[in-house]
Image: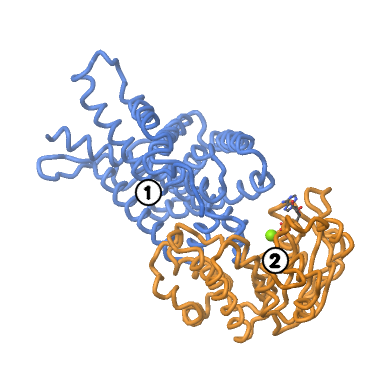
Chain colours: A blue, B orange
Amino acid sequence: MTRFGQSLIQGLGNGSIYALLALGFVIIYKSTLVISFAQPALMVAGATMVVFLTGSFGLPFFAAVPVAMLLTALLGLIVERSALRPMVGKPVFVVAIITIGVDITIRVVVNRFLGNTIRNFTSPWGLDTLRVGDVFVQQRFLAMMLTTAVVVAALFAFFKYSRTGLAMRATAFDQETALAQGISVGMVFALSWAIAGALAALAGTFVGTGGSIDQQTWIIALKALPAIIIGGLDSVGGAVIGGLVVGVIEALVGTYQPTAAPWLGNNFAVVSPYVVLLIVLLLRPYGLFGTPEVERV
Amino acid sequence: MLSVENLEVVYDDVILVLRGVSLDVPEGKIVALLGANGAGKTTLLRAVSGLLDVHEGEVTKGQITLDGDPIHHLSPARVVSAGVKQVLEGRRVFAEFSVEENLRVGAHRNTRRLSENMERVYDLFPVLRDRRRATAGYLSGGEQQMLAMGRAMMSDPRYLLLDEPSLGLAPLLVQQIRDLIVEINQRGTTVLLVEQNASMALSIAEHGYIMETGKIVMDKGASELLEDEDVREFYLGLHDEGTPRSFRDVKHYKRRKRWLS
Ligand SMILES: Nc1ncnc2c1ncn2[C@@H]1O[C@H](COP(=O)(O)OP(=O)(O)O)[C@@H](O)[C@H]1O
Ligand SMILES: [Mg+2]
């Protein structure tokens, strides 16, 4: 039971990282129909900023994170304006390839800052644990879960109640009608990249928390892909659930598979989300919460 | 006054769709723009609202002015801010949103007086007040048309451009929509009404324009148009004895149509 509790919390914590990345992806996809592969770069850019802001600039962690989120939002905005806006109307596939180019470019720059060393990450939690009942859980996982819950709630409120959030949803649903209401669609495009940037920076911070980052850290962001596909490309709620599902599966398989099914080999946990992904795709090709084929009256 | 002067519009750089269209919508009036499918009515409205861009269309000649200021190069957002709002053909409500959310999106350029405008719209369309929490996609066709019009009214426009509001509605609903257009106009909004239902449009308009393949072919007071023999025959589906007749019976339709222009 303790083992289960521990691995569940760890899964939900790591799942929050995937959820934040998937959220950014879905927000970009919904409002601009761009499939963005630039999320990993935005994530490591954000994490690297936290390293330098807390290190070289001596900012406290809780100040560095919002600053890094803001800067990465700005980076997302610049990417949208310079690399993607001129591509509006081009085939989806072409635009997706461009985002891969953007991803590589940003990562090259980030790697210059990171260098060939491992960058230690100072966070208030480190690897400290907290006792809940008879389970020892790492504080950082709880912090990730809580922060993500707050961020997701804030995002939902933003999309439901704010003028800008409604404008973004309207644009996602029907661009021409949104334009006819006087919504500036360009603003919506830029904003969706900015939000995705901020979320990616937060995800990157969580990746570093309790450890370090280096030039290989970006690979973690790839786990957002099964999360998105499990949740459904166009579902904001699905992105969150997809992320958590991937995190939990990975943690549980990592905990139990080596003893329960050793014949599956070492590190089966790493591929387990993809197995689930395949099963989901077989049963519901548009994801658990995605829209089958949006019919409009 | 909203004026279109000698307007030419081209799609995809080559397809000339409007060939020198001129029309005037004087403040306070209802003006009807009639014409068969494909005549270019929607294109004209797009040119006014700045929506040509999304369709790869472009104004290549002429101009559109609002009280003398050219507006045909403004973004849709600017046009809305200037007080001109278009209701797109086919209603196009945000089907996943609630009725009230649809209205709030309509207020995007005018949020300061949101609650005031919402009350005004609910007074105009009481059905919408009753169904404010309903999902827009589940409304009936008539209700959706009302929602689309109410959403447009949320920014308190001076000019309302309606693109075939009666399309696909039962006769009783068409009447209801017609009365609502009159009501909106009486409350101070100028209306440019694009319709294929000529009798409905001419029954409330002061002036009418008839468009064929990108040109205005007739431009008269509404009552004169209603009297006009050709209009009666081709757009009202009535021939001399006043009994309905279908297009199929009008063998010389094509020839006569050319004669019209
Ligand atoms: N986006 C477009 N690209 C090319 N041609 C178009 C486009 N939209 C409309 N057209 C053409 O322009 C003409 C006028 O269309 P439209 O303005 O929709 O007419 P109406 O509203 O009177 O039915 C039609 O021949 C139509 O095929
Ligand atoms: Mg039309």
Q: Amino acid at mark 1?
A: Gly
Q: Nearer the viewer, residue A129 or A89?
A: A89
User: In the structure shown, which secondary structural element does the residue marked by tag 1 occupy?
Assistant: helix
Mark in the foreground, 2 or 1: 2
Query: Which quarter of the image is occupied by the C terminus of chain B?
Result: bottom right
Seen at 45% across and 30% down, the residue is A219
Query: Which quarter of the image is occupied by the N terminus of chain B?
Result: bottom right
Seen at 78% across and 70% down, the residue is B231
Q: Are marks 2 and 1 on the same chain?
A: no
Q: Nearer the viewer, residue A160 or A13?
A: A160
Q: Is residue B74 left or right of residue B109?
A: right
Q: Are marks 2 and 1 in contact (CB under 8 Å)?
A: no
How crowded pointer 2 is (Cα within 10 Å; few <14, some 14-19, many 20+) is rated as many
> Whole-percent x and y of residue A216?
46, 29
Q: Nearer the viewer, residue B104 or A43?
A: B104
The residue indicated by pointer 2 is B49
Q: Amino acid at mark 2?
A: Ser
Q: Is residue A109 visible?
A: no
How crowded pointer 1 is (Cα within 10 Å; few <14, some 14-19, many 20+) is rated as some
Q: Ligand 1 near label 1 (Cβ, under 8 Å)?
A: no
Q: Is residue A176 left or right of residue A135?
A: right
Residue at the far top in the pictured view: A263
Q: CA distance from mark 2 to mark 1?
A: 35 Å
Seen at 76% across and 75% down, the residue is B208
User: In the structure shown, which secondary structural element does the residue marked by tag 2 occupy?
Assistant: helix
The residue indicated by pointer 1 is A237
Q: Is residue A64 left or right of residue B259?
A: left
Q: Is residue A126 visible?
A: yes
